[in-house]
Image (cartoon, helix red, strand yellow):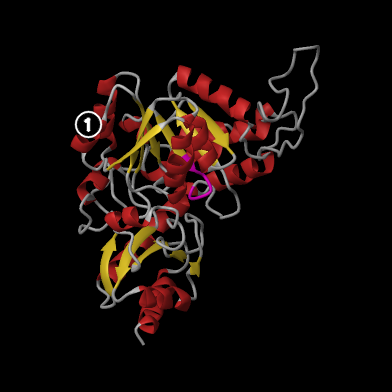
Amino acid sequence: MERGFLPPFPHFATRAIHAGQDPEQWRSGAVVPPISLSTTFKQRAPGEHAGYEYSRSGNPTRDCLEKAAAALDGAKYGLAYSSGLAALLNICHLLKTGDTVICMDDVYGGTNRYFRKIASELGLKVVFVDCTKPKCLEAAMTPQTKLVWIETPTNPMLKVIDIHACADVVHKHGDVLLAVDNSFMSPYFQRPLSLGADICMSSATKYMNGHSDVVMGLVSVNRDDLYERLKFLQNSLGAVPSAFDCYLCNRGLKTLHIRMKQHFHNAMAVARFLESHSCVEKVIFPGLPSHPQHELTKRQCTGCPGMITFYIKGNLKHATAFLKSLKVFALAESLGGYESLAEHPAIMTHASVPQEDREALGITDTLIRLSVGLEDEEDLLADLDQALKAAFA
């Protein structure tokens, strides 16, 4: 691992493997939690059940996942949802008409779309602010502000936000919630709740599951009242994951610590390679000293994931030629799986962001986002090299 980052969180691997997985909870003593596909559960008498009555309200397999995910986030409670956006929807249902949401200006395209096209139509006021500058966040706060939504590193520009500084600003203003989208980092590299956040959300579709075969969202909190409200909404809104998806994600958590170490190793190699390549204009990776928030990253994280963005020289024609020439990297959306992916944010993941906003953020025709996977380092570098050369042939 690279020097200068926070030390690994203690007992992470042990908790990933054992938290919520006690074989004694099953009559069979199964070491691997079974998949509970039943939608309903027998009651001893009317209203007397063994903890479960209907699978939307609670499911044994989902419980195992929620307990494990909470333990990894250093949290008291965990909740699972049918997607990351379903988790966002549930969190926003904590608010009421007339409330204001402050959202980081550079966020996942689906988050931007939800706030602009849906939440704002339902009576929430949404303001987009560069939260890398706590003074800008402070200036945007009003008595109507009830939720501040940030992601760090941001998607796709990989800006790093000082979570502790944001928490200090937010919590000076009474009952305002700070929610952090931790999808890029995963709890292996970053724990927002320990830095002052009220809510930690992850698209488990990404690193938490890690195998590109589950769509899911996870939320962790420490406050009892917040958990009770979110638990009520989880049941009432009904956006819950299937027992099978919970089983898959629970299994994915068991190798999270091993996968994240390798993602970091491969990403560092790729970032250094790209930074020295003649066809590359600029590389953005928080693990590089050239990143403007590199020191902040080292202060609040134990390492970096496999996410890299870079500007290829030339224009859209060169970016397209590069992406079409890749052989190991697949041209596809999403991220965080064992396989390496490449995409074009302006055309793909962030196409729903208004063009003027994309340009202001730096999401141009030559910006490329990589999700560096677990393949052999030399194969990844060779693939990038041949594709870059092909783009300018």
- Boundaries of the magenta span: 202-207
Disc 1 residue type (three-letter): Glu
Please tell me which residue lies in front, 130 or 207. 130
Whether residue 148 appears in magenta in the rendering, the answer is: no
Of helix, strand and loop, which mostly describes the magenta segment? Answer: loop
Left/right placement of residue 17 relative to residue 38 reads left
Looking at the image, which residue sits at the far bottom? 393
Residue at the image point whose x is 56% and y is 54% from the top: 211
* 242, above or below 374, in the image: above
Left/right placement of residue 50 relative to residue 364 reads right
Left/right placement of residue 289 relative to residue 265 reads left
* 233, above or below 206, in the image: above
Please tell me which residue lies in front, 151 or 142. 142
Q: Quadrant of residue 52?
A: top right
Q: Position of residue 276 (x, y in %)?
A: 25, 73
* Residue 12 seen in this snapshot: yes
- Could you tell me how many numbered marks the image carries? 1
- The C terminus: image quadrant: bottom left
- The N terminus: image quadrant: bottom left
Residue marked by disc 1 = 138
* 197, above or below 348, in the image: above
Whether residue 203 appears in magenta in the rendering, the answer is: yes
Residue at the image point whose x is 28% and y is 64% from the top: 283
